[in-house]
Image (cartoon, rainbow, N blue to C red):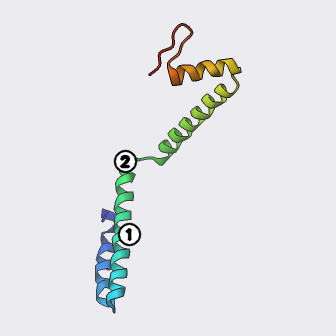
Amino acid sequence: MPPHRKDWAEAMLNEMAYVKSRRAAWHWLLGCTLFAIRERASYELGGVFMNRRIFKFLFGLSAASVIAVTGVYAIQKPYQRERILLFVFHGCTKYSCTRH
């Protein structure tokens, strides 16, 4: 468990004394385990992505870039689009065409 959840982990262990049936114990065990994994993963990922605003900004910037490139491609004249497709998929230029 992350350091800020130590008290919660101790309380979780104390609850085990009050579980009545085997089925309830398995349900309690599964729930506590999944919660502990989720808490630890979010704690570790919080260290990786220290500031979510930066992550959101970079994601938005990359999405805007893809949209801009797609828009520029869409407004090109048909013969220019064909040249781009030939270059991207077949390696063709104005003077040579090499197939991969």
Badge 2 density bin: few <14, some 14–19, many ≥20, Cα 10 Å: few
Task: Give the number of callouts.
Answer: 2
Residue, disc 2: 48
Q: Check disc 1 and report its element: helix, strand or loop.
A: helix
Real-space CA distance between mark 2 and mark 1, rounded to the nearest whole angstrom: 20 Å
Q: Position of residue 46 (x, y in %)?
A: 39, 53
What is the quadrant of the C terminus in the image? top left
Q: Quadrant of residue 28?
A: bottom left
Q: Nearer the viewer, residue 100 or 20?
A: 100
Q: Secondary structure at mark 2?
A: helix
In the rendering, at what x and y percent does residue 71 appear? 66, 30
Residue, x 65% and y 18% (percent of image)?
A: 80
Residue linked to disc 1: 35
Q: Nearer the viewer, residue 45 or 86?
A: 86
Q: In this picture, is 71 found above or below 99?
A: below
Give the x, y percent position of residue 74.
68, 28
Q: Residue at x 58, y 33 (%)?
A: 66
Q: Which amino acid type is shown beneath numbered disc 2?
A: Val
Q: Which quadrant of the structure image shows residue 70? A: top right
Please name the residue shown 37% across and 69% down the image.
Answer: 34
**Residue drawn at 31 percent across, 88 percent down:** 22
Of label 2 and label 1, which has the lower sequence position?
1
Nearer to us of marks 2 and 1 is 1
